[in-house]
Structures are given as structure tokens and as C-alpha cells.
Amino acid sequence: MPTPEEDAQITAAALTDPDSPPLTDAELVQFKRSRGRLLGSGKKEQVTLRLDAEILEQFKATGNGWQTRINEALRDWQNISAPSSARVAAWDTLGPLHRRSGREPRSFRDRECVKMVLQEARK
């Protein structure tokens, strides 16, 4: 701990530093912590979810914010899995054939047919 004389010298030197002016009372108020948890965005919902232990460990190993990263991974999956206009066009083309047969396109031949229609839709 500095002595009172050293503390006075340090304070005087700090007050003369043009790059570090003293903070006003209004500026100090913004740094005061409020009690409790910060309010969320209101757009998220708390859920209980069971995950594989290895998956959870991998996310937790990345440090703080692991729950946000899980949310981002789920959002990425959602964006990848959302039906694209090409997929919708393919289903519009192939759907009646499969609806008549009462099944989804599951066989290799069906998948190849879907790929061809998707490629045509992208052109």
C-alpha cells in the first residue's frame, strides 16, 4: 500500500494526464453493477434438453457462452434444413409421383431423380 504522501503524488500525476481525465459522477454511475442476473432479450425460452455428455463437454470446453454457441449451432442446422426454393420445385415436380405411390423418395433411383430435378431448378 502506498503511503498517504505517495498516494497524493500518484493522484496529482493522474489528474494532470490529458489522456485520462477524471470521470464525472454521471460517468461513474454507468459502471455500477445492479443486483441479479441481466435481463435477456425476451426472445428466448428456457427449456430442458438432454444432450450426449460428449457433445455437452465439447461446448463447455469452449468457455463462457457455450449455451449461446449451442443455440447458434441449432440455428445453422435450421438454416441448412429449411426447404429451399429448389427443393420445393423438386417436390412440386416429383411429389405427385410419390403421392400416388404413397411414399417419400427413398430409393437410390428416387434420390438420383431428385438430384437431377434440383440441378435443373438451379440453372
Image (cartoon, grey):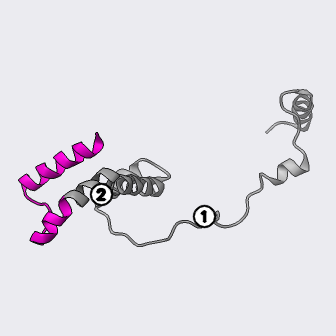
Magenta span: predominant SS is: helix
What is the CA distance from the residue labelled 1 to the residue labelled 2?
36 Å
Which one is in front, 32 or 49? 49
Residue at 84% x, 32% y is 20
Q: Which numbered tag is attached to residue 96? A: none
Magenta stretch? Answer: 94-123
- Work out whether mark 1 precedes mark 2 in sequence or the reverse, and give the earlier one: 1
The local secondary structure at tag 1 comes to loop
Closer to the eye: label 1 or 2 = 2
- Decide if residue 69 is on the left or right side of residue 43: left
Q: Does the magenta stretch include residue 70?
A: no
Residue at 39% x, 52% y is 76
- Decide if residue 14 is on the left or right side of residue 37: right
Which residue bears the numbered disc 1? 40
Q: Are marks 1 and 2 in contact (CB under 8 Å)?
A: no
- Decide if residue 67 is on the left or right side of residue 43: left
Residue at 29% x, 57% y is 88
Q: Check the picture and name the quadrant holding the C terminus.
A: top left
Which one is in front, 14 or 103? 103
The amino acid on which the numbered mark 2 sits, given as a three-letter code, is: Val
Mark 1 Cα-neighbour bin, 10 Å: few <14, some 14–19, many ≥20: few
Q: Position of residue 119 (x, y in %)?
A: 22, 43
Residue at 92% x, 27% y is 16
The local secondary structure at tag 2 comes to helix
Q: Check the picture and name the quadrant holding the N terminus.
A: top right
Q: Where is residue 6 in the image (x, y as percent from the top left)?
A: 88, 32
Which one is in front, 9 or 17? 17
Which residue bears the numbered disc 2? 88
The amino acid on which the numbered mark 1 sits, given as a three-letter code, is: Gly
Q: How many labels does the image show?
A: 2
Q: Does the magenta stretch include residue 116?
A: yes
Q: Position of residue 57 (x, y in %)?
A: 34, 55
